[in-house]
Amino acid sequence: FEVAFKPRGPLHVKRSTLKAAASCIQHGGLGLFATEKISAGVCLGEYPGVLFSRRVWIHTKLKIAPRAVDYAWQLNNGNTLDPTGWTGRLEDNVTDLLGLCQPVPTDLARINEPPVGGNPNVVTHEDQNIVYFVSRR
């Protein structure tokens, strides 16, 4: 395995449950907000992106799109999930290079960490090449 070209990372909640809007965090760009109450322990979904081996991601994608580092998730097993397009920009959906696969929403890539001392309202759990986002409160 070097690259899994089919994007992955489905939402496990209705897309209307979440909304991208200006972050409350300085220089945070867009953040992700709930549009309704979400109970603790609800899996929001999986981190979106195309799965790369670390070596291929560094020597291909990162070279042509250095901005991708802002959103790429470095997995504990050494692989990389990258939700950005080939310019390194985060779009509303991630697609395969040829546009043949179903696009995957990138909403969960917009979750920002709270400021220092803040209380995060989601936690992540890694399982192989998947990162799950679970509500905390």
Image (cartoon, helix red, strand yellow):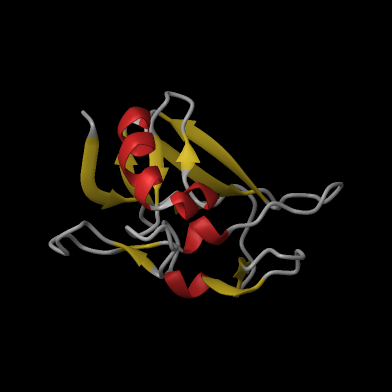
User: Where in the figure is residue 36, as x and y percent of width and height?
Assistant: 61, 73
Image-based side of 98 in relation to 131, left or right = left
How many numbered marks does the figure carry?
A: 0
127 or 20: which is nearer to us?
Answer: 20
69 or 94: which is nearer to us?
Answer: 69
88 or 71: which is nearer to us?
Answer: 88
At horizontal 40% and vertical 44% (from top left) the residue drawn is: 62
* Quarter location, residue 81: top left
User: Where in the figure is residue 58, as x and y percent of width and height?
Assistant: 39, 36
Image-based side of 9 in relation to 29, left or right = left
User: Where in the figure is residue 112, as x and y percent of width and height?
Assistant: 65, 56
The single residue placed furthest to the right in the displayed view is 117
At horizontal 59% and vertical 47% (from top left) the residue drawn is: 41
* Quarter location, residue 35: bottom right
The single residue placed furthest to the front in the displayed view is 63
The single residue placed furthest to the top in the displayed view is 77
Image-based side of 1 in relation to 131, left or right = left
Q: Is residue 32 above or below residue 86?
A: below
From the image, which quarter does the N terminus lie in? Answer: top left
At horizontal 83% and vertical 51% (from top left) the residue drawn is: 118
Image-based side of 26 in relation to 65, left or right = right
User: Where in the figure is residue 29, as x and y percent of width and height?
Assistant: 63, 68
